[in-house]
Structures are given as C-alpha cells and as structure tokens.
Image (cartoon, rainbow, N blue to C red):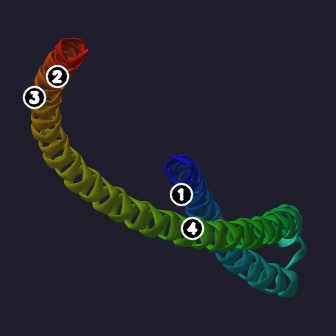
C-alpha cells in the first residue's frame, strides 16, 4: 500500500509537470511568434528608413521647394527609428523570456524523467510484493488443506480412543467384579476351614 500511494503521488507530479511543460511550450511558441513579428516590423521599418534616407538625399539635391518634403520624411525616419528601437527592445525581452521558459521546460522534463523512474521502481516493487503475496496465499491454502487432513485424522483417533476407553472401563468393572468374587470365595473358604 505504501508503494501504491507513492506511485499515485508520482503519477500526479508527472501530470502536473507535464501540464507545466505544455504551458511553457505554449508561451515559448507565443513569444517566438511575437519575436518573428517584431523582426518583420524591424525589417519593414528598416527598409522604410532606408527609403526615406534616399528620398532625403534626392530632395536635398533639388531645390528649396523640396525642403518641406525633406522635413516630412525626416520626421518619418525619426519615428521609424523610434519604432525600430522599441521593437528591438521587445525582441530582446522576448528572447530573454524564451530562454527563461526553455530552462523551465528542461527542468520540468528532468523532473518528469525522475518521477517516471520512481514510478517504474514502485511498480516493480508492487509486482514483486504481489507475487510474494500470491505465493503466501498458496502456501496458506496448502497448510489449510494439511490442517484439515490432520483434523480428520485427529477426529478418527479421538473416536478410537473413546472406544478403547469405554472398553477399558468395561474391563475394569469386570475386573473389579471378579476381584470381589475372589475375595468372597476366599473368605468363605477360610471360614469353612476354621
């Protein structure tokens, strides 16, 4: 019973750590997708920044009329740079979270392996003691049969003893009667002699 309870506890722990591992895997997938999205946005805004830089150079070589356009695209480039920095920091955070949950998943996998081995050992012990219990049950059945045989023999011998005891009582009473007769006859003979 002790090893059965341990096996049940180990099975519950295995289920708990398996669910944690699945949750961690889901979080890893979510942050991986976010990282990919951020990388796409970074590439997108990097290309936009490059395009804006080219346009700035183009309109700078032109006349003063394009100064407004240059300012416009300069502000867009600054916004894009800010977005690039923002998504770069998000990507770094996501990478850290991916590493964190990867280590947790590895720890959970180790614990699952540990408790799986313990559960297997407990199962082996349960099987071992079950076989021993079955052997003991067979031996108890054999000894019960032998006890029944010896009980029947004892009953037979008890009946025979009772029979011989009755015969002994009978012969004892006969012996007593014969002794009393002998005593009488002996006393009668003695009286006659006198």
Cα–Cα gap, marks 1 and 2: 104 Å
User: Looking at the rendering, in which quadrant would you find the C terminus?
Assistant: top left
Q: Pointer 4 and pointer 3: residues touching (CB < 8 Å)?
A: no
- Among numbered discs 2 and 3, the one appearing first in the sequence: 3
Residue at 87% of width from left, 82% of height from top? 60
Cα–Cα gap, marks 1 and 4: 16 Å
The residue indicated by pointer 4 is: 118
- Among numbered discs 1 and 4, the one appearing first in the sequence: 1
| Front of the two marks 2 and 4 | 2
Residue 73 visible at all: no
Q: Residues within 10 Å of mark 3 (few under 14, many from 20)?
A: few
- Among numbered discs 2 and 4, the one appearing first in the sequence: 4
Residue 108 shown left or right of residue 96 in the figure: left
Cα–Cα gap, marks 2 and 4: 92 Å
- Among numbered discs 1 and 2, the one appearing first in the sequence: 1
The residue indicated by pointer 2 is: 182
Cα–Cα gap, marks 3 and 1: 84 Å
SS assignment at label 2: helix
Mark number for residue 167? 3
Looking at the image, which is closer to me, 70 or 147? 147
Q: Residues within 10 Å of mark 1 (few under 14, many from 20)?
A: some
Residue 75 position, x and y percent, is: 87, 62
The answer to whether residue 161 is above or below residue 70 is: above
Cα–Cα gap, marks 2 and 3: 22 Å
Q: Pointer 2 and pointer 4: residues touching (CB < 8 Å)?
A: no
The residue indicated by pointer 1 is: 18
Looking at the image, which is closer to me, 139 or 77? 139
Looking at the image, which is closer to me, 84 or 116? 116
Picture quadrant of residue 51: bottom right
| Front of the two marks 4 and 3 | 3
């Amino acid at each position: 019973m002790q090893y059965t309870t341990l096996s049940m506890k180990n099975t519950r722990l295995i289920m708990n750590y398996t669910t944690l591992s699945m949750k961690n895997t889901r979080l890893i997938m979510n942050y991986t997708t976010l990282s990919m999205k951020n990388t796409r946005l970074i590439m997108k805004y990097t290309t936009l920044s490059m395009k804006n830089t080219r346009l700035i150079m183009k309109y700078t070589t032109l006349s003063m009329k394009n100064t407004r356009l240059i300012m416009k695209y300069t502000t867009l480039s600054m916004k894009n740079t800010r977005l690039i920095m923002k998504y770069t920091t998000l990507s770094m955070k996501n990478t850290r979270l991916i590493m964190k949950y990867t280590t947790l998943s590895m720890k959970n996998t180790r614990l699952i392996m540990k408790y799986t081995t313990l559960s297997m050992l407990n199962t082996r012990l349960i099987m071992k003691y079950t076989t021993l219990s079955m052997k003991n049950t067979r031996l108890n059945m054999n000894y019960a049969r032998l006890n029944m045989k010896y009980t029947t023999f004892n009953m037979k011998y008890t009946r025979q003893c009772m029979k011989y005891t009755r015969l002994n009582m009978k012969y004892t009473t006969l012996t007593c009667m014969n002794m009393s007769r002998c005593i009488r006859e002996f006393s009668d003979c003695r009286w006659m002699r006198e």
